[in-house]
Image (cartoon, rainbow, N blue to C red):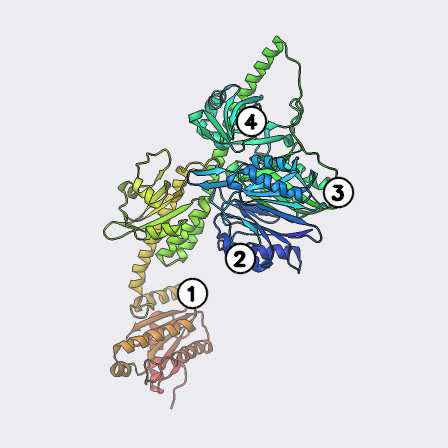
Amino acid sequence: MRAGVGYSDIPDSIAAGKQAAENAVGMAGRGEPCDIVFLFCTARHDQQRLREAVASVVGEGVPIYGGGAVGAITNEAYGYAGDQVGIACLWLEGSRCAALLDGGLSSGEEGAGFRLGRELARLGAVPDSAVMLLYNSVHHEEAGMRMLMATWIMQGLEKALGFLPAIYGAGMMSDHTASPAGQYIGRDASMKDEHYAMAFMFSEDIHIDSVIMHGCRPASPYYTVTRAEGPVLLEINHRPALSFMEELLGPSLKPEEYPFFLLFGINHGERSGEYDESNYASRLCLGIDRERSGIVMFEPDMVAGTEFQVMNRSFDLGYMRPKIESLFEGLEGREAVFGMYFDCAGRCAGFGGTDMEDALVLQQTVAGRVPLLGIYTGVEIAPIAGRSRGLDVTGVFCLFSQGRKKASVKPGGAASKAVGKKPRQSQRQLLEAMQKLCERNMRKMLELDSRSIQLRYELELKRRGFRLLAELALALRQEKNDKSLFSQMAERINATLNMQKTLVFLADESGSFSPVVLRGFSLEEREFLATRVFEIPQDLLLHPLVVTAEDSPERFAALRAACNLPFFAASPVLLQGKTVALLLTGRTQEVQPYLPRLGRGDLEILQAIGELLGSVLIRRRLSDITFKAETDSLTGLWNRAAFQRMVEDYLGTGRKRAGAFMVIDVDYFKTVNDRYGHIVGDAALVACAEAMQRVLRNTDIICRQGGDEFTVFCRGIKERRFAVKKAAQIQEAWQKIIPTEGSRHITASIGIALAPQHGASFQELYLNADAAMYKAKKRGRDCHVCCGDPALH
């Protein structure tokens, strides 16, 4: 088997698809089409157009599988929460990969797993078969969104097979806000909105070895789940779960901070043995259920009787390198051919609090030994203690190799637990004291962890904000059209700040506002909003503010409902003290644990963008005023006063600077005006101005002095031959201008003076060039004369 990988972060889906696919094919250096493609992209992309672009490179008949990803990683690049695309092309070279699909995942995870299991059994799956599993981890329905559980898919697989093979893979997710995403399901070119579970079983000569990396260590004694319902823990140690944790953690971690910050670990190794990261399945809190005093987890495997510990995260990624190296060292003669990394989206440095991106550690360690494709996911899947499980806040590195068969992996159940003797009274008292000390230290560590992660997130938000401001400052200065200016800004806000929707309202003369830019809205929403005129509440026009779930539903209720944007940050754009526009950006839901509630950091960035826009608009208005005062209203060229100022500025630097000064007169222009009228005459003057702009340099100064007279100053020209060449170019360009049907072409009489030979001041040069121009007229017009040219007799 051979592989090639590609990456792109181009916003345009067609360009991104072609770039990523061409990179993958080029990396492999193969001439024939590949056998299978794995393609992933963020929610920013048009998945259909992306697939079409990839297929145009790899071939229309090549099956493409995959779907959404928060970001992508390859050997040379990585990125998340933007426009990332990641692709892997595989050439099987005699090996096999059977793709099995089940489209009923949202109707029941266990049923989908069972049906896949029966297909795997039909293909002869055994406990050590190499199987990869991909599925959408989030299902959107009218009642909201819900997580699709890897645990239940595994249960269905095991029921059908009678064992659980070693399974590696991910629950896919397209961004940190869990936006809906389609899936790629092989040769079917249409995107599928229904949820598929996709299993890929490789032939016996292909092996997958993996390491799990979460860097979490136990910070507490063991506690026991005594009642649970699906993913909701209802009782811990026979007490209501939420109350138990509130008492245990105290003020160090508030219940609303439990999502993302509260992490449990289930030890599938020996309870009394030495700590081994590979035996711990991380379990992340998804939310709290106050009504039932419950704690909602990502996975439903913490059933009654499950023992767990509160875990402490490590922000030092030094543990990763030796684990990855161990896979390469343990190949036992097999050839490593491909690396796949399933990385929890919460482990991104901007959200997980680490000093360094784990993608960088991975790239540096793999070091080009195999083609590498990684995706940021919602759920990761890998074996722990001999049994495949869904994992949270974990990176799973899978190394594909080819060669002789390795030793079988026994299908695993729960690992045995060490049973100790019942402690005596004095020992019990000592254990209780140690437990209290351990819990006290745990509270301190969790408090520090949560503060560190929040601080790092705020720093990441500011970093993104500064980068966005820098990008916008450059783009806004280059963009001349107001609507295009606002459109670029809205696009970048969504991509950089993980917003789902951004609007720009512009004020009319009556003080009403209309949406002129809509990004992230459906076609129906755009059509509805495009016809609306809004009376914006005064609070939003006076100062920046943020609206979250903490606000009353009645606050700005009409605006929130009309825009289908319940949570937003808003900032007015002021021009000379008057609100001329309103920026509104936000999300349709507050999605914990990946993104915190909109807050001050988001508002500060939006306010800075609003102030930047205001300053650009002011500068543009001032530039317009200045430009109109210094240009000729008919031709758009510099007027006499501006021309004189610019030439004098150039000449008046204290040095003898070279240049060619030309005075140009349109021959017989009065005849054109008298015979064909002023409209034709004006059009002829505009055509003359445009012709000069085409043939002269950007550094040359072109002016309409008035009437039919133009002046030109060409910086840096020292010699007559170069000045004469410029004059000839103007004459040639004008001779192509015919004012109207039946009229003769335009010709010019041009006088030239050179600085400093014929004058060091504006006045001297003008007078000498003007005198030369009159000499050209006396010679019969349609010619040029330079000062110092011999007189004709």
Q: Residue at x 30, y 53 (%)?
A: 531
Tell me the amino acid under the disc marked 2.
Answer: Glu
**Mark number displayed over residue 405:** 3
Disc 3 to disc 2, how far (Cα)?
A: 38 Å
Question: Which badge, 4 or 1, comes first in the chain's sequence?
Answer: 4
Residue 66 placement (x, y as % from top left): 56, 48
Mark 2 sits on what residue?
52
Tell me the amino acid under the disc marked 4.
Answer: Val
Secondary structure of the residue carrying tag 4 is loop
Camera-nearest label, 4 or 3: 4
Residue 359 placement (x, y as % from top left): 59, 43
Observer-nearest of 542 and 289? 289
Mark 4 sits on what residue?
303
Q: Quadrant of the C terminus?
A: bottom left
Question: Which badge, 2 or 1, comes first in the chain's sequence?
Answer: 2
Secondary structure of the residue carrying tag 1 is loop
Q: Residue at x 39, y 57 (%)?
A: 479
